[in-house]
Image (cartoon, rainbow, N blue to C red):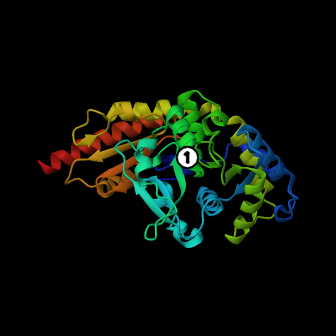
Amino acid sequence: MGSMDWIDLRSDTVTRPTPAMRVAMAAAEVGDDVYGEDPTINLLERRAAEIFGREDALFVPTGTMGNQIALRLLTQPGQEIICESRAHILDWEMATAAVFSGCLIRAVPTASGILTWKDIEPVIFGRGSSHRAATGLIEIENTANLAGGRVTPLPVLEEIWANAKERKLPVHLDGARIFNAAAFLGIDVKTLTRGFDTVMFCLSKGLGAPVGSMLVGSGEHMAQARLYRKALGGGMRQAGVLAAAGLIALEQMPARLPEDHANARLLAEALANVEGLEVDPQTVETNIVIFRLQPPLTSTALAARMKERGVLISVVGPHVFRLVTHYDVSRQDCVAAAQALSEEMEASLAAQA
């Protein structure tokens, strides 16, 4: 089976650059970005700053690097970072907050995956204790990936911003999929992120660019962020070829995200009544669907069976798997994947009977 035949629902990171992106990459004007001389990167950074209403922006190779630079910028070693217990910075970023920033993560479990001020306030600690580490930063992830792409609404964020400001606590947004959140809410990203000190967002997920994420914030923060990027090995040279694709991702791709959301809802609704599978279509707000399997069926076994049928799914727990819709999976692909999953579940249950 050739690579073009797969229905790949593992992640929106698997999107391939569009024809327009490839043309732009081939024609990109470039220079040495470590010297600040790559015109295409400079343009991308200016546009990102404009779109998010910030002073400056920084192009980074990955979302993880963008997040980790922000954590370093906004904290002191020995502090705590508050985040939701399923946050990407906790489970998927190699404990870099401890290694690079010398900070401990204070994980707060929630039923929905969405942090509110009511969840955050009880775990904030001041600098006065001779035993307890002080809180240095609040981190929010929107959309919340492992909570099934759930969206934090603007009023919830506004309450966090206002209270954090009162406590003189910085707030960082892991906005890997912030354009998905904005599309769901019908709000622009500038409004949806205006109270954060720093925002990281990915060009390489739903927006379809092959590589790259952005960090946006104040001019002072971004000047320091540039130095931290270099320290992490993220100083790139003629990376305008990547930024050219990033510009198309930023300018042209957000408008098509509702299509991915509709496909994710289709998957959830098609599989909601399949025996042995648990999913609530009402919680599917963006392009991610999390399914629970009733034991003894494991997600690893199911993923292997689905792969044989040409459908790739992501294992996120012993009895939990994830489907992510994106630019490279059509509605027809989603219908076919749902049918294959439904048949596979039926066969597995029959084998257990």
| Front residue of this view, candidates 119 and 347 | 119
Relative to residue 217, is residue 353 drawn left or right?
left
Q: x, y (%) of residue 166?
A: 57, 45
For the question of whether residue 91 can be seen, the reply is: no
Residue 116 vs 94, above or below: the answer is above
Residue 9 vs 35, above or below: the answer is above
Q: x, y (%) of residue 86?
A: 42, 53
Crowdedness near tag 1: few (<14), some (14–19) or many (≥20) residues, C-alpha within 10 Å: many
Relative to residue 317, is residue 195 drawn left or right?
right
Q: x, y (%) of residue 10?
A: 46, 50
For the question of whether residue 76 can be seen, the reply is: yes
Residue 71 vs 310, above or below: the answer is below
Relative to residue 311, is residue 98 drawn left or right?
right
Relative to residue 172, is residue 263 drawn left or right?
left
Q: Which residue is mark 1?
A: 164
Name the residue rendered at 50%, 67% in the picture: 94
| Front residue of this view, candidates 135 and 197 | 135
